[in-house]
Image (tube, helix red, strand yellow):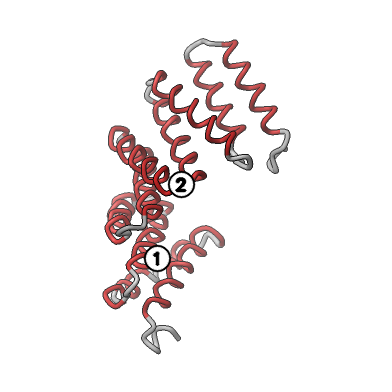
Amino acid sequence: LAKKIKAYDIAVKHTANLIRYYNYETNTKEKGKTLISNTKTLLQFVKNKDIVSKFYFEVADLYYYLGEFEESIINYDSAFFYANNNVSLKGLSKFGKGIVYVDTGEFGKASIELQEAIAYFKKSKDTLNWINAKNSITILYGKNGVYEDEEQERNELITLANQYKNYPSLPSVYYNAAASANKTSHQKKRINYLLKALHANETSEYKN
């Protein structure tokens, strides 16, 4: 209907929502993929560029979960470009791109993108995504044996997560810290982190 009455902002906005729905809610990603090419022809008529950015972001996410990483990066870049002054969307685009680089083993590029994402989330006071990005970068450092940087990032992450009272992944943050302590043979520190993970989990909705 939006297409029919040439309400292109509405048409693209809800197409982006539908792609997200197929990607996350119904796991029918190929159905989401069929929407992309026809919708791209409408983008030139969309006045609100944040909608264009959000469309590219959802497309990038879809390609990521389909394992089409090159297409994913191209669309994250487009999402970043059209975000203009939307700092939160810029951060999400950098975060998504960083995760692609983590999965493809390009750890140097991943670190740069994740650090930039953190700066955008910090600027926009998006605490939850700031924490999530920090968690990703600590895991990245741990994978590459950069334990000093990992510990520094994780300490900042734990401070943030404790301030954000309802952060659901705090137990796993402590668990990852324990795993890194084990790698460096710090068993007392490892046990301490595991106890903290158990304590943090007592109030979690994912307790079991």
Which residue carries the number 2 mark? 125
Q: Quadrant of residue 137?
A: top left
- Image quadrant holding the C terminus, namely top right
> Residue tagged by mark 1?
33
Identify the secondary structure beneath mark 1.
helix
Q: Residue at x 49, y 39 (%)?
A: 131
Percent from the top left, x then y, of residue 141?
Answer: 39, 27
Residues packed near mark 2 inside 10 Å, few (<14), some (14 to 19) or many (20 plus): few
* Image quarter of the N terminus: bottom left
Asked whether 11 or 116 is in front, the reply is 116
- Residue that protrudes farthest toward the bottom in the picture: 5
Q: Quadrant of residue 56?
A: bottom left
Q: Residue at x 52, y 17 (%)?
A: 181
- What type is the residue that disc 2 sits on? Lys
Disc 1 + disc 2, Cβ < 8 Å? no
- In the image, 119 versus 207, the foreground residue is 119
